[in-house]
Amino acid sequence: MIDLKIDLEIDLKIDLVIRTGENTMETPVLIIMCAFFVIGGFDYIFGSPLRLGNKFEEGIRTMGPLALGIIGIYSLAPFLLTYLTPATGMISLFLHIDPSILPACIFPVDMGGYQIAQSLASSPDFGRFSGIIIASTIGATISFSIPVACKFIKKEDNRLFAEGLVIGIISIVPGCFLAGLLSGIDVLALIKNMLPLFVIIALLSVSLIKAPAGTLNGFIIFGKVISAIGIIGLLFQGLDVILGVKIIPNLIPFSDTAVLVGKIALILGGAYPMMEVLNRVLKRSFVKIGSALRVNSNSIAAIIGNLASNILVWGTMKDLDERGKVLCTALAVSAAFVLGGQFAYVVSVEPSMAGPFFAAKLASGAISIILTMYLLGRKNYQVKVPGAADKHTESV
């Protein structure tokens, strides 16, 4: 009999998932974001003279897309657990790893990864590590970032995109390891439980190098499946709320999911104005950074936007130079959402993991930059010089 220490009555510890988070506002970053939330709100009231009101509005408007992406799959977590529990239990026993590791490698943190990992984990520490750190990195990469990116990437950019993906995916490993240590997990236990992550990343890297087109098409299909599951869950919620028809008896209450989505949107209402101010204050520094990295201004803008969401990277991919495409893709995998939706979700459900979350993202991002600069230094890339009308190839 497999003992996964899970309550199949599907309580799921919703109080942990939805809680507003004791001591959350003691986090300095959140205090700053709250200040910008208030400033942005008043600026919006007075017609946005500081040009922060529009960013405040942009953050609040994310509530719709967030609801579309989170409510459905979050609501289905108890149902999914009834099928995931036996499979992950057997595999975990065979590999001698925590049952929460494998699901976290598939589901993004804010699309079921956290609550599933919490319910399957053998201990609270591993539940937090898997559900927050692994699900926000490799889980988000597999089920969100790559499928979404494939909708934007042109065929001629597949090689550069694949190179950036490999660099970013490899960089995730040391970042997750650091976050695990900061989470208080024993070193030997951490190494043993991260073995599946090493294998998945190695297989992905080899597949992207050897067969980039086929691998990317596979990710597109997988992403559509995850999205479809979420929409089906949303439809079940709609039938329950509108007509009182319960197709799945253990569906998580709509009120719980709505509170979570609303809280994330409110945090983003402060995060976006803060990002705007950072862009203005550090504009000259960004120019110097772009010069040091030898990428164009569009690439630097994409890197900064990536802190909130990597969708900006994918949407502007056509405007980036070749060095920028590789670098931005690597960072979009390893360091995305550090001040965006993922961060808002993490501090909403597990505020104690904000520090390890930041450490994982920033360490992985730094390693991505180092690896990219080293590897690009050994190749000839087409570099669009900012302000220049033509392109030229430089040996860098």
Image (cartoon, helix red, strand yellow):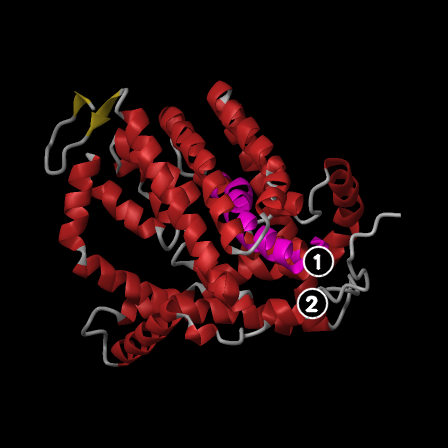
Give 66 or 378, whichever is nearer the viewer.
Answer: 378
For the C terminus, give its image quadrant.
top left
- Residue 150 seen in this snapshot: no
Residue plotted at (36% across, 24% down): 156
Give the amino acid type for the residue marked by disc 2 in the picture. Answer: Lys
- Please report whichever mark, 2 or 1, sits nearer to the chain's N-terminal start: 2
Question: In the rendering, at what x and y percent does residue 172 appear?
Answer: 47, 40
Range of residues picked out in magenta: 118-146
Quadrant of the rendered structure where residue 289 is?
top left
Image position, residue 181 (x, y; %): 52, 50
Please rate how many residues cluster around mark 2, counting C-alpha atoms within 10 Å: few if below 14, some from 14 to 19, many from 20.
few
| Residue 153 appears left or right of 52 | right
Disc 1 on helix, strand or loop? helix
Residue 373: give x, y in percent of width and height: 28, 31
Q: Residue visible at 56% across and 49% down? A: 135
Is 43 situated above or below 130? below
Would you name the residue on which mark 2 appears?
Answer: 13
Say which residue label 1 marks. 119
> Whole-Å distance between the Cαs marked 2 and 1?
8 Å
- Determine whether, in the image, residue 166 is placed left or right of residue 240: left
Cβ atoms at labels 2 and 1 below 8 Å apart: yes
- The amino acid beneath tag 1 is Ser
Tell me which secondary structure the magenta stretch mostly adopts: helix
> Would residue 5 be visible to someone looking at this image?
yes
Q: Is residue 292 above or below residue 268?
A: above
